[in-house]
Image: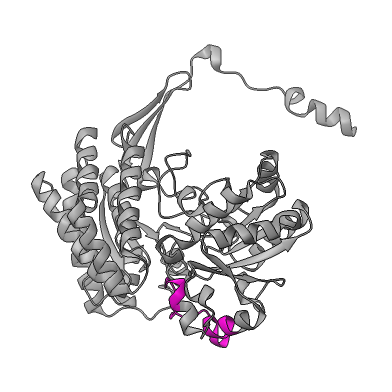
């Protein structure tokens, strides 16, 4: 049920949230007019709150303990890498005062805060995603109130302890960063979205729909269900290593982890062999059927398998073959797409669907079918030595990113070896029912005021009718 569809909150809920938002607004007014140096200091302070090694480790351990999702070492790496990369992106970026001047156009751009941000964050990344939102919000001189998933609430509470300690160290108001009190309810979250100035929603489709229905400007992300193509020209060993690393990182909690690989027939067997060297095990028909029954009881993904190790999933399914018990990820061959073929959807686990295609055109067609079912707008992976094929996919598939010869779950959210902004929230455009198609970044946390001056007389010229319509009229006899 969305925030708009839910019953109106009680006066108690409205008042509780209003008091919290009022505290955030009062804190935001303190920094509203601060200069760039202070905005940068606020962002760095929040970043250090999660990057400091002992804190990072404590957050990762608590996240895995209380959510039951993912891997501690990988969460430590994710917390550090995402925050370090974000701060690298923000270094030198202007977010306060005059940020651009275009004298030839008579335009001056001034960055202004959006005010109070409501951030809805998921259990899969209960430390890294809130930290990313906090840093971006503070860079823009905003306050932020977070609504964690119930399982992620304890991790966020600890993160806020660390953030408040850093804000105190630099003499900044603690109320710049707040959270809904536990237990976090749907009613409180819905009311927060209604009272904030901007909503940023990452996580379930229900969260995103509620954000867009709240009546407040919202940035929500689409569903993940990433597919990757390995074509006949690919370095198969390198492709397998990249896909395996992406598929197994943090037990596939990322929406950017591959769910399907479409292999051109000429390299499909070699790819399966390469996956085996990386710890992937191809299941036979009987094993696949047993896994399906375990993962998709009544046709829906079981929470028991989400972000669990491959060996644990295999044990749940009663798969006893020694190779399966020691697998890093499981591979199932599929032919169909859609609800009757649940392996073609998002699995949030180290289980990879493998499809074979006659050629590159057929592979692209299969990926289009997958996204017609689930995951439109997000991204597609391509392993190839023919870069023009990436452009072909960008021109034809409903995706916001085409990731070429990279570890997909790292590359889509920004990487040191590509130019995308570091982020844990990827917009999926109108294909994914989102209002943006780039990686969520600090610019989304700003209002931009434009001072507009008249152009010099020599630059003012109204076009003639012939200049605009002449060619059209001559070609069509109009």
Comparing 255 with 177, the one in front is 255
Which residues lie in the magenta part? 290-312
Residue at x 74%, y 25% (from the top left corner):
465
Comparing 85 with 384, the one in front is 384
Comparing 80 with 467, the one in front is 80
The N terminus lies in quadrant: bottom left
Specify whether 25 is left or right of 428.
left
Comparing 421 with 144, the one in front is 421
Residue at x 44%, y 69% (from the top left corner):
204
Specify whether 419 is left or right of 79.
right
Residue 249: x and y in percent read 43, 60
The C terminus lies in quadrant: top right
Instruction: Examine the rendering and report whether any part of residue 118 can be seen.
Output: no
Specify whether 254 is left or right of 225.
left
Residue 296 lies in magenta, yes or no?
Answer: yes
Residue 43 lies in quadrant: top left
């Amino acid at each position: 049920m969305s925030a708009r569809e839910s019953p109106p909150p009680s006066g108690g809920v409205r008042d509780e949230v209003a008091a919290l938002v009022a505290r955030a607004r009062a804190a935001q007014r303190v920094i509203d007019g601060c200069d760039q140096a202070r905005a940068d200091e606020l962002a760095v302070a929040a970043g250090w709150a999660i990057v400091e090694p002992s804190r990072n480790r404590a957050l990762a351990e608590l996240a895995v303990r209380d959510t039951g999702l993912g891997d501690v070492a990988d969460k430590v790496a994710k917390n550090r890498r995402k925050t370090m990369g974000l701060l690298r992106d923000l270094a030198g970026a202007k977010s306060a005062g005059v940020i651009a001047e275009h004298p030839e156009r008579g335009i001056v751009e001034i960055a202004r805060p959006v005010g109070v941000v409501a951030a809805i964050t998921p259990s899969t990344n209960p430390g890294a995603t809130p930290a990313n939102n906090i840093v971006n919000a503070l860079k823009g001189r905003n306050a932020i109130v977070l609504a964690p998933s119930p399982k992620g609430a304890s991790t966020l509470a600890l993160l806020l302890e660390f953030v408040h300690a850093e804000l105190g160290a630099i003499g900044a108001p603690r109320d710049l960063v707040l959270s809904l009190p536990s237990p976090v309810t749907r009613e409180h979250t819905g009311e927060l979205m209604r009272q904030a100035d901007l909503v940023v929603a990452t996580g379930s489709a229900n969260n995103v729909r509620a954000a867009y229905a709240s009546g407040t400007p919202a940035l929500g992300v689409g569903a993940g269900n990433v597919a990757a193509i390995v074509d006949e020209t690919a370095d198969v060993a390198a492709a397998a290593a990249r896909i395996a690393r992406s598929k197994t990182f943090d037990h596939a909690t990322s929406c950017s982890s591959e769910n399907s690989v479409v292999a051109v027939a000429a390299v499909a067997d070699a790819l399966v062999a390469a996956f085996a060297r990386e710890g992937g095990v191809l299941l036979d028909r009987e094993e696949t059927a047993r896994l399906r029954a375990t993962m998709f009881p009544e046709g829906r993904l079981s929470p028991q398998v989400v972000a669990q190790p491959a060996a644990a999933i295999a044990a749940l399914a009663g798969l006893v073959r020694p190779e399966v018990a020691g697998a890093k990820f499981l591979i199932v061959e599929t032919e169909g797409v859609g609800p009757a073929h649940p392996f073609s959807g998002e699995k949030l686990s180290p289980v990879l669907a493998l499809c074979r295609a006659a050629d590159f055109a057929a592979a692209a067609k299969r990926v289009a079918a997958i996204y017609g079912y689930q995951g439109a707008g997000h991204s597609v992976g391509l392993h190839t030595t023919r870069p023009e094929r990436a452009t072909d996919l960008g021109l034809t598939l409903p995706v916001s990113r085409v990731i070429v010869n990279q570890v997909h779950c790292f590359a889509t959210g920004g990487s040191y070896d590509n130019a995308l902004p570091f982020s844990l929230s990827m917009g999926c455009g109108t294909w994914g029912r989102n209002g943006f198609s780039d990686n969520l970044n600090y610019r989304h946390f700003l209002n931009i005021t434009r001072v507009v001056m008249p152009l010099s007389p020599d630059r003012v010229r109204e076009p003639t009718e012939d200049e605009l319509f002449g060619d059209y009229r001559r070609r069509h006899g109009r």
